[in-house]
Amino acid sequence: MVIDNFLQALFVVGLASQGIMAANRGLWVNRLNHRNICASRRPHSSVAPSGTTSVHVIATVLTTYSESPTPTSRFVTSTVTSKPLTRTATLSNSRSEDSTSNTHASSSTASYTAVTPPPTTSSSSFIPNGIKAGIAGGDAYSYFKDHIGWWYDWTPNPSKPGNPIGVPMLWGGGTADSTDAARLAAFKKISAAPSYVLAYEEPDCPSGSGSAGMSVSSGVSGWESLIVPLGKKGSLMGSPSMCKQADETWLAQFRSKISTEWDFTAVHINKNNLEGVKKDIEHYWTTYKKPIWVTEFACVNAPLDKNGFVPCTDQREINDYINAIVPYLQTHQHVHAYAYSNGLGLGKIWPLMKGGSLSASGKAYLEAISRYH
């Protein structure tokens, strides 16, 4: 009888223990469901690399251990890309772990949500046709067209046959001279958005010497009414280019007053040595932190903002300058385009053409850029 009573007591205790365990499991499931609901509202922080297809996987992994009645749960966020697989895992305990590392998992549920990354402009978009080299001025175009990605001639409608992109320009405010007025009128007729557009030729220097000579307020007005609408249609907008190079102050004032900033900074470089070139590039990158287009470079012994504009006249000096600046600009991570200036006022040795054919300087530039394309 005593043994029977003892066995009955053990049976009752066993039932009670099972009831407690079942209750604990029910409580745990309720908590897990609550955590799942909260987790589904939590924003994802993982972002796939640009140019890949991003899929975020939220998986609840239930693990039951035979030695413990209390299972564990993990919320794992993985980033899966079309590139070689890398995963970024975020766990509920803030530790990083691959969801496949748990070999004790007995059951799992997963939901998949496709995430589209926000639109961005890739750095390659700032390199015209994937080729940095270009020319300012169209006189030598036929010699260079197979080796450049872009060109322009300071007008709103550059047009030449071939693959290089002709980049339109809003040269000035229409008040410098009759040519400026005609260019402004032609620019206003542009309706379709070009791939790239340039704004203002050296507005920080007086007009009459190849510069637009504009006040900041006049520049802001034209930018807002003529350049920004093209940007909204998809054009990448280039800033006004300064004649005072690293000593400029006009562009910073202009930037503080416009509603929409430019996409890339247009830079003019008139130097005769690489150290001067580096100084200009460094100024524009550290000040504005935008991709750089060197829309004009020339070999000049004394820039306009110092002691007068004195072009280089020694062919050896010019060749050395070309062979130094081209590799520097070509390999600089912040420079996305550059153009040899074939404009007026650069003396008799620098221009690309001489007597209807390439000059010695033109041949030096063609040879320098042909190493890259």
Image (tube, rainbow, N blue to C red):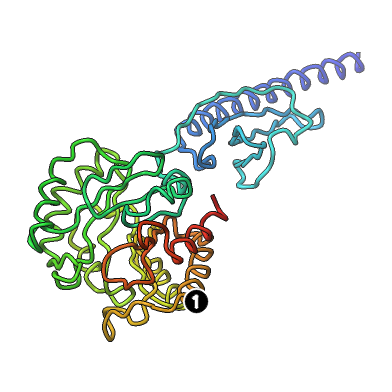
Which of 223 and 244 lies nearest the eye of the viewer? 244
Label 1 Cα crowd, 10 Å radius (few <14 / some 14-19 / many 20+): few
Quarter of the figure that contains the N terminus: top right
Q: Position of residue 332 (x, y in %)?
A: 51, 62
Which of 261 and 39 lies nearest the eye of the viewer? 261
Q: Position of residue 188 (x, y in %)?
A: 13, 44
Which residue is drawn at the image coordinates 34% and 77% (left, top)?
311
Q: Which type of secondary structure does the marked residue at label 1 adopt?
A: helix
Vertical side of 163 occupied by 2: above or below: above
Q: Residue furthest front?
A: 355
Q: Position of residue 248 (x, y in %)?
A: 27, 74
Q: Which residue is mark 1?
A: 316
Count of marks placed on residues: 1
Q: Position of residue 217 (x, y in %)?
A: 11, 63
Which of 118 and 320 lies nearest the eye of the viewer? 320
**In this image, 26 relative to 66: left or right?**
left
Vertical side of 65 occupied by 344: above or below: below
Which residue is drawn at the image coordinates 87% and 19% (left, top)?
6
The quarter of the displayed image where residue 348 is located: bottom left
Vertical side of 295 occupied by 102: above or below: above
**In this image, 329 relative to 75: left or right?**
left
Which of 56 and 60 lies nearest the eye of the viewer? 56
The quarter of the displayed image where residue 264 is located: bottom left
Vertical side of 231 occupied by 288: above or below: below
Which residue is drawn at the image coordinates 13% and 54% (left, top)?
222
Looking at the rendered structure, the kind of residue marked 1 is Arg
Q: Residue furthest bottom?
A: 307
